């Protein structure tokens, strides 16, 4: 054995390059979310969980599935949101023990406080890419997410 590593295949390089770009993009989105959420008294993670239950209350496990997070991390965030008065637990008619997380007025107000800065950030990004290209990028990312979900752990 010569100790030389095999050259990566083009597919390996493509996967690695894509993963690194997504990791960097995730960091950039998280940094932006922290910057936007801070003045409203939230963190990016708190805002993310509140956003998941804005349309309708969900159990912690449903939030975790929706956001691609672990149930335990969502449980810690939900408990903090309830403790800080941004959300409440309410009975779940579908499951006795799995309470629903619901946004309450203070949480809704905090999310609304973020909206003007979020709108401005979105406008800057669309201006940078152009509306058509921004939609193409979004669609490509959604397509990548769906492909990864179909492949599951076998990727």
Image (tube, helix red, strand yellow):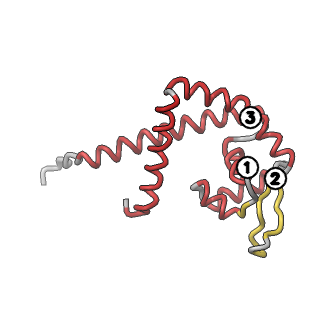
Q: Is residue 122 above or below residue 92?
A: above
The percent coordinates of residue 73 (x first, y second) are 65, 56
Residue 12 in the image: state x and y as whole percent. 29, 48
Distance between the alpha carbons at the discs numbered 1 and 2: 8 Å
Marks 1 and 3 sit apart, C-alpha to C-alpha, by: 12 Å
| Residue at the disc numbered 2 | 87
Q: Give the structural element (helix, strand or loop) at label 3.
A: helix
Residue 59 placed where, x, y %?
72, 64
Q: Residue at x 78, y 38 (%)?
A: 112
Q: Where does label 3 land, which residue?
A: 114
**Label 3 neighbourhood size at 10 Å, few (<14), some (14-19), many (20+)?**
many
x and y percentages locating residue 51 in the rendered image = 70, 48
On residue 50, which mark appears?
1
Q: Relative to residue 27, is residue 55 drawn left or right?
A: right
Q: Tell me the residue at 66%/36% (across/down).
A: 34
Q: Residue at x 83, y 57 (%)?
A: 88
Front residue (pair 55, 72): 55
Q: Is residue 59 left or right of residue 124?
A: right
């Amino acid at each position: 054995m010569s100790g030389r590593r095999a050259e990566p295949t083009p597919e390996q390089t493509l996967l690695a390059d894509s993963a690194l770009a997504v990791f960097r993009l995730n960091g950039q989105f998280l940094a932006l979310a922290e910057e936007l959420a801070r003045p409203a008294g939230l963190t990016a993670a708190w805002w993310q969980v509140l956003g998941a239950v804005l349309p309708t209350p969900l159990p912690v496990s449903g939030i975790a599935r929706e956001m691609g997070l672990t149930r335990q991390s969502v449980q810690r965030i939900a408990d903090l949101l309830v403790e800080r008065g941004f959300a409440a637990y309410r009975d779940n008619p579908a499951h006795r023990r799995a309470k629903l997380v619901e946004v309450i007025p203070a949480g809704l107000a905090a999310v609304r406080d973020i909206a003007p800065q979020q709108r401005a950030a979105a406008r800057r990004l669309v201006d940078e890419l152009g509306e058509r290209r921004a939609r193409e990028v979004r669609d490509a990312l959604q397509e990548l997410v769906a492909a990864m979900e179909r492949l599951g752990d076998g990727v």
